[in-house]
Image (tube, rainbow, N blue to C red):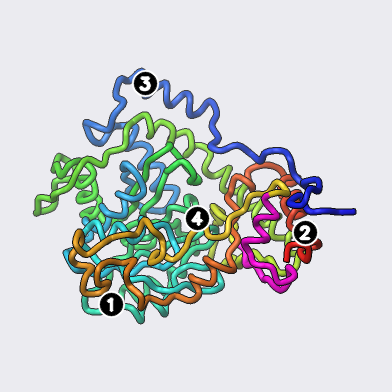
Amino acid sequence: MEKLALFGGTPVRTEPFAPWPTFDDRERQYLAAALESRRWGGYPYPSPMSMEFGRRFAEYHGAKYCLPAANGTVTLEIALHAAGLKAGDEVIVPALTFAATAAAAVRQNGVPVFVDLEPRNYCMDPEAFEAAITPKTKAVIPVHLGASIADMDRIMEIARKHGLVVIEDCAHAHGGQWRGQGVGSIGDMGSFSFQSSKLMTSGEGGCITTSDDILRQKCMSLINCGRKEPGYDGFEEQLFTGNYRLSDLQVAVLMGQMDRLDEVTAKRAEMHAYFKQVLHAEVQGLRVLDTDPRTTRLSAYQTIMKFDSEAFAGIHRDRFLEALEKEGVDLDGPFYIPLYHIPIMNATSDEYPELRARYGDGILSATDISCPVAEKAAYEEAVWMHYPHLSGTKKDVEDIVAAIAKVQRLAGDLR
């Protein structure tokens, strides 16, 4: 008699999935070249290898410039600084993303304003964005989430109408393309992360993309301690900042990652489509979020699904995930929760006084923020599958679906 592994049955899957991060001789060769050059750090800035990586990454994404930096958090801060954010300026962000998206505004003495999501893709709802605009609004940071690209047509239309700076948060979206244009090249700037769990990684790292030459120069100065040197001294003001350079050892790893970006992006898109096909044929009540037809190259960092409790004998999503993990498939539910609930968004007004007018003692003390789509996704509905599950074989995908189908068949035992 079939029994869930949670209750002593045989798991569907006992083998590990594809390892991450991946590397081969390409990274080794670039690292050897950096090592032998004896230029291991990021100074003098920029290095020839950093410039070459930036050229290749920008070209792939349809931007004129790409500027590597220390990580994908400071790239957001630098972008806001370069855009002229002043104390008290508001920055509109989606409620469901990593804390850095909003924290970047706080760290620049701005005020993040949280807006709800589109149910179809869990990206920023353009109408909620427009409704949140006030005379204090300076910028908007749409986030390309999981395998979805935010509605950049509508977001750009609204932003241009109101004179707002658009900074795309592309931490999930390396290689993604919207209507033939790379993510990070549609808004005024794009911010990418190369942290260890990202589609391209150097362990830590990030970059800023832009096609505006003055923004390029300001970002370069902000990365390099505020220095103004030949090639990025063509703007008037002196900027106050810190050291956010990326070392050449990290850039060397990214060069190897860049060599395979096209190949792995295509494979993930293929496996994402195969997973969706098999899942929807075998399982009811767990549906992959739709891909917007304007997406012309899918990046597939996370495959996000919607869970319908009624199709699983009325059990809660988290109970489903508990049983699924015992079957050898570890997916996530509250991968993100609304930023106004997450403990690491504990920005208080005694440290950041510009928050007080909107948030009282601090962001987590506010009680009048409501983003129901984001809250339902976080606590009831969203199921996240990290992309290493799509980096292996079709048998891996079939095992994942078989485990989900088994839990669905026996869901009544979980009540």
The answer to the question of whether label 3 and label 2 lie on touching residues, with beta carbons closer than 8 A, is: no
- Disc 4 target residue: 176
Q: Nearer the viewer, mark 4 or mark 2?
A: 2
Mark 2 neighbour density, 10 Å: few (under 14) some (14–19) many (20 or more): some
Q: Earlier in the sequence, mark 4 or mark 2?
A: 4
Tell me which segment is drawn in magenta. 305-325
Q: Secondary structure at mark 1?
A: helix
In the depicted view, which residue is nearer to us: 356 or 293?
Answer: 356
* N-terminal label among 1 and 2: 1
**Residue corresponding to mark 2:** 405
Q: Dot 1 corresponds to which residue? A: 162
Numbered disc in front, either 1 or 2: 2
Q: CA distance from mark 4 to mark 2?
A: 31 Å
User: Do the CB atoms of the residues marked 3 and 1 lie less than 8 Å apart?
Assistant: no
Tag on residue 35? 3
- Magenta stretch: includes residue 107: no
